[in-house]
Image (cartoon, helix red, strand yellow):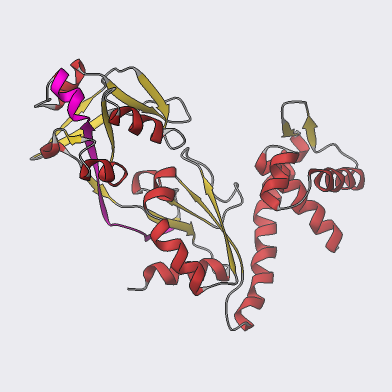
Amino acid sequence: MATDLQDLFAFLAVVQAGGFREGARASGTSASSLSEAVRRLETRLGVRLLNRTTRSVVPTEAGARLVERLVPALGEVEAALDVVNSFRDRPTGTLRLNVPANVSRLVLPSIITPFLKTYPEIKLEVIVEDSFVDMLAAGCDAGIRYDDRLEQDMIAVPIGPRFQRFATAASPAYLDARGRPEHPRDLLTHACLRGQFASGAIPTWEFERNGEIVRVDPAGPLLVRLGSAVDLAVEAAVDGLGVIHLFEDWLRPHLDNGALEPVLEPWWQTFTGPFLYYPGRRHLPSPLRAFIDFIRSP
């Protein structure tokens, strides 16, 4: 039975990661051992579970049906095993968090180090993903998102700053050459450095002042993937390529040292900070419970 469970976990790791090599990295094992485990499972069940090509590994119809049942079932197995942790003096195990890039950069650094020093027997895995994902299907215990992107039927706990702002800025040299916008619509005549979600959508820039909301969709010479290439856009702004619109905390070091100059500051929009969210199930893994208690503590 133990071997059967290991093979099932191996199969799920390959599917969730999208390949044997990626699954090996995520699970801390070798691609060959995962391949052998999936082969044993397919032989035992008498059906092919994965379609393998040189470019991708995707589940067959039978494999997809198995994944649907495995995710909640193996989650219950892990939860049952985790009950043993309640008999330990200190929680142990692995906590997997799915977070967007801005949270990994702006929110987690001040939390992770003290948390792991407080609970040295917990291992933390942070998966950075800016697109909207099924957190449970991705094999994570919890996620961090903003309230407009929270999954349904989840418990949400505030984490990090309760209010943040989007800031708009450009280098002094750029503004000296092109002029300083006085209204958000003035950005339509400026070179703007834009971001794009993994889905391909390009979010509009939104501003607010005295209850008036203005949305603009400016053009510019640079488009970057939000999360993975944002620093490239920031450096381009510092170098005078154009105007950038981003989390204030991300731009703050450059604003403080004068490399970037605030633009349209009275219009900067304030929004609610992020939330840790997780399923409202009866038993929580002890590493997740410890993390929740930690972020709730004063």
Q: Quadrant of the C terminus?
A: bottom left
Residue span colored magenta: 155-177
Q: Which quadrant of the figure has residue 295?
A: bottom left
Q: Nearer the viewer, residue 62 or 25?
A: 25
Is the residue 282 above or below the residue 155 in the image? below
Residue nearer the viewer, 83 or 27: 27
Q: Which residue is located at x 12 percent, y 21 percent?
A: 179
Work out whether residue 287 can be spotted: yes
Taking the magenta stretch, the answer to whether it contains residue 163 is yes
Residue 148 appears at what percent x and percent y? 35, 44
Image-quadrant location for residue 246: top left
In the image, 228 versus 153, the foreground residue is 228
- In this rendering, would 97 be left or right of 137? left
Total marks in image? 0
State the residue in front, 172 or 113. 172
Residue 23 vs residue 267: left or right? right
Q: Is residue 163 left or right of residue 130?
A: left
Q: Quadrant of the N terminus?
A: bottom right
Residue 126 in the image: above or below residue 129 = below
Q: Where does residue 170 sit, x and y in percent of width and height? A: 22, 30
- In the image, residue 6 above or below residue 268: below
Residue 283 visible in rendering: no
**In the image, is residue 173 part of the stretch drawn in magenta?**
yes
Residue at x 57% of width, y 53% of height: 140
Position of residue 188 measured from the top left corner of the image (x, y, whole percent): 20, 18
